[in-house]
Image (cartoon, helix red, strand yellow):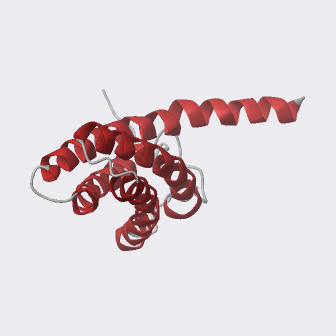
Amino acid sequence: MRFLKRLYRQVVSLVRHELGKFGTIGAAAFVLDTGIYNLFLLVLGPMTSKVLAAVISITFAYLGNRFYTFRDREQSGLGREYFLFFLLNGIALLFGVLVIGFTSYTLKLNDMVSLNIANIIGVGLGTLFRFWSYKKWVFLEATTPIPAELPEAGIRQDR
């Protein structure tokens, strides 16, 4: 029974704290990615537009996730984290590029609606991969618990 209570607390904590924040940052990055993607589609091809939009939204997402979603996790250095973050997002970007490439070059659907649907599907698949991989490799669990309050340092305030 204790196991189930502990499991329940962990799931609630995950959903309330990390998943909700991850979703907020992800939604903002999605809006940024989609807006830039559509802007670039006016002058560039679908694959180039996707890659450029992704680079900008990935940078935004890194900063949001590091300093908001996973701020209570151990920091292993911004350079290491950003490299891993970009590497894993590059893998996740492959989902989007493959779906857009399939839609554009195989199905020959190059209208804005088809390309945006392909983008949304690719982003969705990539998001599942990103959430799992960030927790596993980028934003690691803290090795020592972070105190809820600062400890009393023996400082007295005389009134």
- Residue placed at 44% from the left, 41% from the top? 22
Position of 16 with respect to 33 (left or right) is right
Front-most of residues 17 and 42 = 42
Snapshot quadrant of residue 155? top left
Q: Residue at the location (33% across, 52% down)?
A: 108
Q: Residue furthest right?
A: 1
Q: Quadrant of the rendered structure where residue 93 is? A: bottom left
Picture quadrant where residue 27 is located: top left
Q: Is residue 5 above or below residue 72?
A: above
Residue 3 rendering spot, x and y as whole percentages: 85, 36
Number of marks in picture: 0
Q: Is residue 157 above or below residue 125?
A: above
Residue nearest the observer in this picture, 6 or 51:
51
Q: Position of residue 17 (x, y in %)?
A: 51, 35
The answer to whether residue 54 is left or right of residue 129 is left
Q: Quadrant of the N terminus?
A: top right
For the point 61% across and 60% down, the residue is: 143
The answer to whether 143 is drawn above or below residue 3 in the figure is below
Q: Residue 125 appears at what percent x and percent y?
A: 50, 48
The quadrant in which the C terminus is found is top left
Q: Between residues 128 and 65, which one lies in front from this camera angle?
A: 128
In the rendered image, the vertical position of residue 1 relative to residue 100, given as above or below = above
Residue found at x 83% / y 31%? 4
- Relative placement, left or right, of 42 versus 72 is left
Q: Is residue 29 left or right of residue 3?
A: left
